[in-house]
Image (cartoon, rainbow, N blue to C red):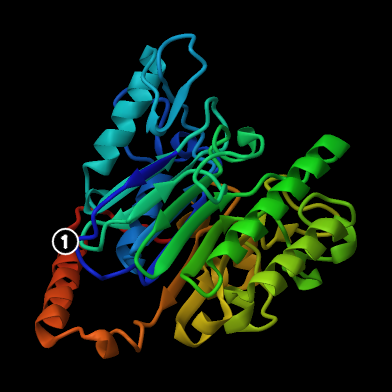
Amino acid sequence: MTEAFTVEDASEPLSFASWNANGLLNRIRDKSDPNGRRTRALLALSENVMRKRPDVIALQEVWLKCEEMGKGTGKWDHAKMGAEDKKLRDEKAFIEALMGRRPFKNYDAYYCLANARRAGVITMVKKCLAKPIRVARTLALDGRDVTPDEIDTNEGRVLMLEYEKMIVLNTYVPHNGSNAERYEKRALWDFRVQRFLENYRGKKDVVWMGDLNVAHQDHDVGPSPRLFEGVGGFTLPERRRFTDILAATDMVDTYRAFNGDRLTYTWRSTRGQGLDGWQGMRLDYFVVPRKLVARIKSCETSTDRFDDTTAQSMPMSCFMDSDHCMIHLSLHKREDDDDEGENEDEDEEENARRAKQQKLDRDADVILISD
């Protein structure tokens, strides 16, 4: 399933935020209020957007059901929210109202939703930037599902935005699980994503982001790797496959490339502190071609500004009531942009667009959250 657009200008995203919401409506809508007033989590999400002003916001596990194309047909429009019953209509109305308010009104939203209340991803892009040339909701190279589509499209796991020089890939990777069927599903997924990334190697810069459901190295789990032996996300086969993907595509984990071996976790156990302390895993990533490493301005987990004891408490400003915290990546502008014929008028035009966007962000009526 793809969509085609006309490119309006050459500006591409430079800053990114990614967050696994673990059920978006469960985080941002207060069920006790029929009017859906903002919760602390929604305010924290808004504050994050205001503070960082990312060009792209990637969400995973939104748990919004897609639209059925005719009752009982078994055909689905994964780009649209469902409205077949009152509950779905209420959910759709809430999300649409949210997207009509600042700071989110400054973004175009693209959806890849499941045909049930599970998974689902949303990518939001600032309206002042170029429109994508193409939007796809599958890892298939020809835009169609050549292997079982429940792996990505029907489960709402893939959203790809293609630009002139860049691919923005938002994924919610299937959990490895604990049985042979799940192992096979995850292995097939890893094969498909490697094939997808290899296809664009040297052609376009892929910025792959989201919940990749793998803790790649021993220091990506804590307090001790032994606690995670055999646990999905930390099994040797999936960690080795992730290593193979990076090697085959000449791509890098931006957090490690920029921060070295610094300990940080993007997922925290909500079960509380046990005998071995709080459990955490780094499951959320930005992965880019190696040649983009020199362009990394910053790459951070939102808890990096806290000590580990505070991070263990899962601050609202970072986790927004989810079990995952938000992560951020910022890139420097391409050095070759000016060499390819951009004149001063075009530069001034782009600067004016960004200045206008920043003013809208600053004027947004958002209450800032403090921990």
Q: Residue at x 19, y 61 (%)?
A: 8
Q: Is residue 68 above or below residue 319?
A: above
Image side of residue 137 versus residue 12, left or right: right
Q: Quadrant of residue 314?
A: bottom right
Residue 103 percent location from the top left of the image: 25, 53
Check the image and report above or below for 94 versus 165: above
Residue at (28% x, 40% y) in the render? 98
Q: Can see residue 342? A: yes
Q: Secondary structure at mark 1?
A: helix
Q: Is residue 30 left or right of residue 353?
A: right
Query: Residue 370's x, y, as percent?
Result: 40, 61
Q: Is residue 123 visible?
A: no
Rendered location of residue 160, percent (x, y) = 46, 52
Query: Residue 133 or 72: which is nearer the viewer?
Result: 133
Residue 110 x %, y %? 36, 45
Q: Toward the viewer: 126 or 188?
A: 188
The mark total stands at 1
Q: Quadrant of the N terminus?
A: top left
> What residue sits 32% from the left and 56% below the top?
132
Would residue 176 be found to the left or right of residue 19 on screen?
right
Residue ranking furthest to the front: 142
Residue shown at 34% from the left, 28% from the top: 92
Q: Amino acid at mark 1?
A: Leu
Above or below 306: residue 117: above
Question: Residue 361 occupies which quadrant of the picture?
Answer: bottom left
Front-most of 137 and 317? Answer: 137
Q: Residue furthest top?
A: 72
Mark 1 is surrounded, within 10 Å at the Cα level, by few (under 14), some (14 to 19) or many (20 or more) other residues, namely some
- What is the residue that sits farthest to the left in this orientation? 345
Position of 10 with respect to 271 (left or right) is left
- Residue at the spot of label 1: 360
